[in-house]
Amino acid sequence: MLGSTLVTPQTGPEGTRVNKVLLEQGVNIARELYAGIAFDRGSRMDAFMVSTEGGVEIEKVAAETPEKIHKQFIDPVMGMHPWQARALAFALQLGPVATKAAIKVFLALYEAYRARDASLAEINPLVVTTAGEVIALDAKMNFDDNALFRQQEVAAMRDPLEEDPLEREANEFGLNYIKLNGNVGCMVNGAGLAMATMDIIKQAGGEPANFLDVGGGANVETVGNGFRIITKDPNVGAVLINIFGGIVRCDRVARGVVDAIGAAGISVPVVVRLQGTNAEQGREIIQQAKLGFIWADSFREAAEKAVAAAKGGSE
Amino acid sequence: MSILVNKDTRLLVQGITGGEGSFHTKQMLEYGTNVVAGVTPGRGGQKFEDRVPVFDTVREAVEQTGANAAVVFVPAAFAADAVLEAAESEIALVICITEGVPVMDMVKVSRYLQGRATHLIGPNCPGIISPGACKIGIMPGFIHKEGRVGVVSRSGTLTYEAVWQLTERGIGQSTCIGIGGDPVVGTTHLDALKLFNDDPDTGAVLLIGEIGGMAEEEAAAFARDEMDKPVAAFIAGRTAPPGRRMGHAGAIISGGVGTAQSKIEYLRGCGVAVAESPAEIGATVQSILK
C-alpha cells in the first residue's frame, strides 16, 4: 500500500499518494456510530452531532435522513455541559455500559476540540464493540490557522509532503496560492478581488489556473515571487495581473512588475491591469518598458485579453 | 449624513505607534478624520506627529479626550484584548483592522459585547468611511465620493473596485463599511442593512458578498421583508472549489453550504439585483437607482 495512489471520495478523482499507514488492532464491531463537532457560524456555537449511521458520509445522512442526527449546541465560552453529553449518548440507545463510555468520549472529544482551537473534530466511525467498549476507529481534525501561534504541538504536526509543492512554496513566501486546473494564471491583491478575477476569467470563456492573493499591498518582491510560482504550473498559457492600488500606488506596482518580471524575461503573455491610485503613471511605465506586456484598462478587457492570449499559446 | 461615523466622530487609535497604526493614522489625519488620541501601553505621555496625545490605557484616553470611536491596529494575538479594553471604556464604535485573529477569541468578544453599547466592525476588515466626513481604516480615501448609496462588503480591494465603479459613474456613497472576511465578525451584512435602512440619507444599498456561511442570505431576507430601499449585490467565488479556504478564513464552501450559485439564486429570489460580473457592479447599482 505504501507509495501507491489511493482514490477515495475525499481525495478527488486524481487520488493521493500514500506516504504513511497507521496499523490498529482489529476489534469486534457491534455498531458503527458517528460523532463530530464543527463550529456553526450562524449561532456562533459549536455544533456537536452524533448519529447511529457511522461509517458513511455524514452529509448524506443529514440530507436523506436528518432524523438520524442528534445535535447539541455548545457555547464555547461555557464549555460542554455533562447533561449535553448524556443527552447525545442516550439518543443513540446504546445500552447502559456503552452509554457510560460514550458520555466520557463525548466530553473528552469536546475538550480536545476546544483546547486545540479546532474548527472540526470528527470520529467516523465511532464503534461499539461486542464487549460494550466505545472506540474511535478513525478521526479527523481541522484547526483554526489563525490560532496556530498558540498551538505549537499542532503546528509541528504539519507534513509538507501532503501539500501541493507550489502551494507549499507560496506559503513560504507568505503568499496565498491555491492551484486550480485552468490555463489563465492570475495575480491579484486581496482575496475578494482575487475570487472576482477568477470568476470573470471563467465568464470570458477561460479557466483560472490558480487563486493568488499577494496581499493588500503588492511590492516588487511579492509580485516577483508570485509570478515565479504561477508560471511554474505547466498548464499556464497566460498570466493576468490585476492590482487595485489603494494605499499601494500603481506606479510602484508597475515598477515591481517591470523589475521582477521584465528582467527575467517573459515566458508567457502577461496582461496587466492596474486601477486606483496613480493608475495612469502605472500604465505609462508598463507600456514604455516595451517588454511585451499587454495592457488592459477595464476589468472585463483584462479578462478577455488574458483568455485570448492563453488560447493562442496552446494552439 | 451617514451611518456610524460622521463629522462628530472623535477617533482613538489603538496601536498608534506601530508600523501599520502610524502609517494609517497619518492617512486618516490627511483625509480629515478627527483623530483625538492614541493608545500604546508604555508610550503614555508622548505625542504622535506632534499633535495626537498617546496614552497607556484606553480609559485614560477616553476620559481626557472624549474619544467616541476606536480603531484597532494591534497584532492578532492581542487584538481581542484591545477590543475588550475599548468596550470596557464604553466606546460606542470599535473597528478592528487586524487580520488573523483566532475564531475563538472573536466568539468570546462577541459574547462579551452582547447587551453592551459598543458596536464592533471587523476584524480583518478595511474599516468604514463616510466620504467627505470621516475615514477610519486603511481604504484609499480618494476613490470615494459623497452621495446616497450605502456599501457593505466582506472584502477590501474588491470593495475599492466596486466603489471606484460607482464614483466613475458619478454615483456617490453615504457610508462604506468593510465588515471583514472572517467567520465571526462584529457587524454582519444584516446589521449593516438595518443601519442603512434607518438612515434617511441612504437611498440604495450595494452588498458585496463572497462564498461561505449564510450571512448574505440573512441580509437578503431582511431586504425582502423590511426594506423599501433597493439593494444591488455581487457575490464573489463562483469558480471557487469546495473545501478550500479562499484567502479569507470565512470564504470556504463546506458541506455544500455557501456556494456562490446558491447565494445568487437566493438573493435574486428576494428581489436583490445581482451583478453577473464583477465588471458590472457599477451598472447594476445604476439600474436600481430611481
Image: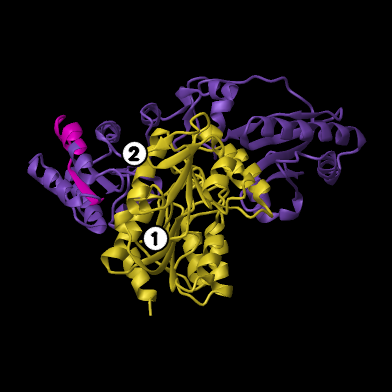
Residue contact at pointers 1 and 2, CB within 8 angstroms: no
Colour of the chain lettered B:
yellow
| Residue B128 is one of the magenta-drawn residues | no
Judge if badges 1 and 2 mark residues of a common chain: no
What residue sits right under mark 1 in the picture? B133
- Give the magenta part as a residue range: A256-276
Q: Residue furthest right?
A: A96
Q: Secondary structure at mark 1?
A: loop
Q: Which chain is purple?
A: A
Between the C-alphas of marks 1 and 2, the distance is 31 Å
Instruction: Name the residue carrying label 2.
Output: A214
Neighbour tally class for label 1: few under 14, some 14-19, many 20 plus, Cα within 10 Å: many
User: Where is residue A93 shown, x and y percent of the image?
Assistant: 86, 43
**Amino acid type shown at disc 1:** Ala
Residue type for callout 2: Val
Residue projecting furthest to the bottom: B290
Closest to the observer, A91 or B234: B234
Question: Is residue A266 part of the magenta span, yes or no?
Answer: yes
Sort mark 2 into few (<14), some (14-19) or many (20+) by Cα contacts within 10 Å: many
Dot 2 lies on which element?
loop
Q: Residue at x 11, y 42 (%)?
A: A292
Q: Chain of mark 1?
A: B
Identified at 36% across, 28% down, the residue is: A173
| Residue closer to the observer: A89 or B80 | B80
Q: Quadrant of residue A239?
A: top left
